[in-house]
């Protein structure tokens, strides 16, 4: 197996397993965060925006050096962002 497959599989296991058990459904969680960010920022933020911004946070952290967990999390946020955009 190669690194890209390892990262994708690790992310898959997190977003479809442990993280969902800890935080509840992604749709509910990201919609809640979007509501709070909308109130704070004063303009509309969607659930997919939350996912994309969280991926950017992880990418920003990677500027300081490679961190496997940031790569894994960024992949997961992007996948969840696509799901939120599709309304599933």
Image (cartoon, rainbow, N blue to C red):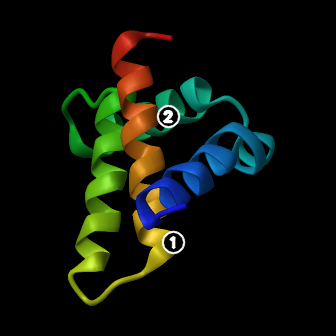
For residue 56, which quarter of the picture?
bottom left
Q: Residue furthest top?
A: 87
Asked whether disc 2 touches disc 1, contact meaning CB atoms under 8 Å apart, the reply is no
Q: Residue furthest bottom?
A: 64
For residue 38, which quarter of the picture?
top left
- For label 2, count other residues whose C-alpha is less than 10 Å away and answer few (under 14), some (14-19) or many (20+): many
* Number of the label disc, if any, that sits on residue 16: none
Q: Nearer the viewer, mark 2 or mark 1?
A: 1
Q: Residue at x 68, y 37 (%)?
A: 16
Compared to 14, does 61 lie above or below? Answer: below
- For label 1, count other residues whose C-alpha is less than 10 Å away and answer few (under 14), some (14-19) or many (20+): some
Q: Which residue lies furthest to the right in this view?
A: 21
Q: Is residue 68 left or right of residue 52?
A: right
Q: Quadrant of the N terminus?
A: bottom right
- The residue that label 1 is drawn on is 69
* Number of the label disc, if any, that sits on residue 30: 2
Q: Is residue 54 left or right of residue 80?
A: left
Q: What element carries label 2?
A: helix
């Amino acid at each position: 197996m190669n690194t890209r497959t390892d990262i994708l599989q690790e992310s898959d296991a997190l977003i479809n397993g442990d993280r969902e058990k800890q935080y509840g459904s992604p749709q509910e969680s990201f919609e809640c965060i979007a509501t709070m960010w909308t109130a704070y920022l004063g303009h509309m933020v969607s659930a997919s925006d939350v996912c994309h911004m969280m991926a950017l946070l992880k990418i920003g952290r990677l500027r300081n050096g490679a961190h496997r967990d940031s790569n894994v999390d960024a992949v997961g946020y992007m996948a969840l962002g696509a799901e939120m955009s599709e309304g599933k």
